[in-house]
């Protein structure tokens, strides 16, 4: 940023009404540019502006004196990948190693491994999933108990510590999922091939076998190296049809019992302080030409929750088991919220008169959940859930077990997705070394140093992956809404600033901005303390319903602009 002779540089956004705003790095307020002061600059240009004395709606007023660079090209997925240094192609030596290990004979991997191929094991995944790294089983025992098995692909049998495959997986840290492609952590020979738990194929796994009593309480468990062969691959939709009574299947009774176990453990987690956030995720569907066919909120039905619950159960069992053994380990932790952020969140809620007992000095999950339970309006609950999430710390990986605040869990880790997450792969190795009595003093010392580095690296790669996935979703939503310019949608106010109102569209999860000058006829002023727009005749609050019309889409910035319906 250059400030010479009262001049400054930034990126220009031009509205459909002809005037513009210049966004400046590290400056909260943008700079208003009247139509007659654009001087030939167009939307997306990097420009140099000179300040004028007057202001527009409290923002500095200026004129453009020079176009430094043109940036009118639409952003692409490749641009976002480059921004986050995401390299889709694997080095040749990594691909060669993957091809070599993919041919490993299973008979060479059976030392201290139990053959469970006779068990009725199934997978439940999205219909379009290719990397199937978890499978489940449920069988009744003669003594009236039952055994719930969670079987996870034994990727560590193919990806040895220090190998070229391992170094590349460490660098990537995670698989990244975009609507039109996947950037896998491991080459597809492994992720979609010998490590994927495809039906009727023998596969190496690590299994957590949990014995439950007749009331589904956990009474014992065993963690072992196994060989499995899944019987059936279900999609979430297929399982939901069976649970709803709209379809029959040989696994119907098993699935119904799995659903009962899920509901029991969901209740138990709520009773210990788990927080259930209502924050929808976009599901972007492409047609055969790679163009956006539809965008909608990703479902979270009982069929999804079965796998979610069983994975949480396995993650907790493994984390507690390894913690009590005092093994070097990578935990998944979520620390308590920062009191200052909690205070800000409480202040934001004041205008809504939401009953709560959140104590910023001694906050717990029950307080957050009780507050969310007191919100009857579902759209408002979505907005408040999002704000509540922002008031919390980010979950991360750490070699120290400090618990998981949002889950209400004392012990937690990520064990169930070693195909797509590096921490899972690391702890698989450590568990197997313990099971095979291969851990000595020197190895433990080396592992203690390594899990520190792996935790830090994986936490950062996860942050980058989430940010990239979010930006690509924003791009795809913008591309979708470009086809709907001029159309009106029912929205909900989900953010307010001094320059306008952000609106969320529940129908397709898109989010855009209504600038102050495009709000209903009134003279609005932003009230920072309560995050409201206060006018002479009306006010606008977070959570308010609002009908908006799409008036513009900026595919360079992946942003959508609305105008509010005058009748609002």
Image: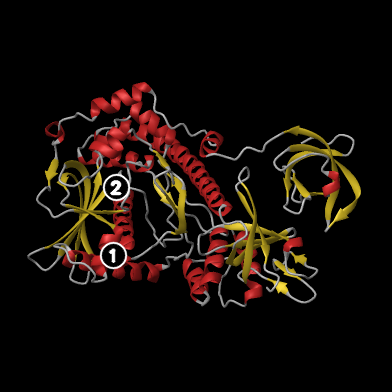
Q: Residues within 10 Å of mark 2 (few under 14, many from 20)?
A: few
Q: Residue at x 17, y 44 (%)?
A: 226
Q: Is residue 282 visible?
A: no
Q: Which secondary structure lies at badge 1?
A: helix
Q: Residue at x 58, y 76 (%)?
A: 354
Seen in the picture, residue 66 relative to 505 is either above or below; the reply is above
CB-based contact (under 8 Å), mark 1 and mark 2: no
Report the side of 494 relative to 293 (left or right): right
Q: Give the residue at mark 2.
A: 325
Report the side of 96 relative to 112 (left or right): right
**Residue found farthest to the top:** 93
Q: Which is nearer the N-term, disc 1 or disc 2? A: 1
Q: Residues within 10 Å of mark 1 (few under 14, many from 20)?
A: some
- What label does residue 240 carry, if any? 1
**Residue found farthest to the right:** 53
User: Residue 144: horizontal and vertical position, in percent?
Assistant: 11, 68
Q: How many marks?
A: 2
Q: Residue at x 27, y 42 (%)?
A: 431
């Amino acid at each position: 940023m250059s400030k010479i002779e009262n001049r400054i540089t930034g990126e220009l956004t031009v509205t459909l009404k002809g005037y513009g705003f210049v966004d400046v790095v590290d400056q909260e307020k943008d700079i208003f540019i009247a139509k007659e002061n654009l001087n030939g600059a167009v939307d997306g240009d990097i420009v140099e502006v000179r300040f004028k004395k007057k202001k527009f709606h409290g923002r500095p007023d200026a004129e453009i004196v020079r176009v430094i660079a043109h940036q009118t090209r639409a952003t692409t997925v490749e641009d976002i990948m480059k921004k986050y240094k995401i390299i889709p192609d694997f080095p040749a030596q990594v691909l060669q190693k993957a091809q070599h290990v993919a041919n490993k004979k299973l008979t060479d991997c059976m030392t201290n491994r139990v053959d469970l191929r006779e068990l009725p094991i199934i997978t439940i995944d999205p219909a379009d999933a290719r990397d199937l790294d978890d499978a489940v089983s449920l069988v009744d025992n003669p003594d009236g108990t039952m055994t719930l098995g969670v079987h996870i692909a034994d990727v560590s049998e193919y990806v040895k510590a220090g190998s070229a495959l391992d170094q590349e997986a460490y660098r990537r840290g995670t698989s990244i999922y975009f609507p039109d492609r996947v950037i896998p952590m491991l080459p597809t020979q492994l992720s979609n091939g010998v490590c994927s738990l495809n039906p009727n194929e023998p596969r190496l796994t690590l299994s957590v076998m949990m014995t439950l009593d007749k009331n589904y309480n956990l009474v014992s468990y065993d963690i072992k190296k196994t060989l499995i062969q899944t019987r059936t691959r279900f999609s979430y939709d297929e399982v939901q049809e069976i649970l709803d009574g709209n379809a029959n299947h040989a696994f119907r009774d098993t699935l119904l019992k799995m659903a009962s176990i899920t509901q029991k453990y969901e209740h138990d987690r709520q009773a210990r302080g788990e927080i259930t956030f209502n924050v929808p995720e976009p599901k972007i569907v492409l047609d055969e030409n790679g163009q956006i066919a539809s965008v909608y909120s990703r479902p979270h039905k009982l069929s999804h929750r079965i796998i979610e619950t069983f994975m949480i159960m396995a993650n907790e069992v493994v984390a507690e088991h390894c913690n009590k053994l005092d093994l070097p380990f990578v935990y998944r932790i979520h620390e308590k919220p920062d009191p200052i952020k909690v205070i800000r969140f409480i202040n934001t809620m004041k205008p809504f008169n939401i009953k709560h007992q959140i104590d910023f000095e001694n906050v717990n999950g029950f307080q957050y959940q009780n507050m969310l339970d007191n919100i009857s309006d579902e759209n408002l609950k979505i907005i408040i859930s999002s704000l509540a999430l922002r008031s919390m710390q980010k979950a991360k990986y750490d070699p120290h077990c400090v618990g998981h605040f949002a889950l209400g869990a004392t012990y937690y880790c990520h064990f169930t997705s070693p195909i797509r997450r590096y921490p899972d792969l690391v702890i698989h190795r450590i568990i197997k070394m313990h099971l095979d009595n291969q851990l000595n003093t020197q190895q433990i010392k080396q592992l203690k140093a390594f899990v520190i580095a792996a935790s830090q690296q994986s936490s950062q790669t996860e942050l980058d992956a989430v940010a990239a996935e979010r930006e690509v979703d924003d791009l795809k939503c913008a591309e979708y809404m470009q086809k709907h310019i001029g159309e009106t949608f029912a929205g909900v106010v989900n953010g307010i600033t001094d320059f306008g109102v952000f609106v969320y569209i529940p129908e397709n999860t898109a989010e855009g901005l209504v600038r102050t000058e495009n709000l209903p006829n009134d003279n609005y002023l932003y009230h920072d303390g309560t995050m409201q727009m206060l006018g002479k005749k009306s006010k606008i609050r977070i959570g308010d319903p609002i009908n908006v019309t799409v008036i513009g889409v900026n595919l360079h910035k992946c942003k959508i602009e609305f105008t509010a319906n005058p009748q609002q």
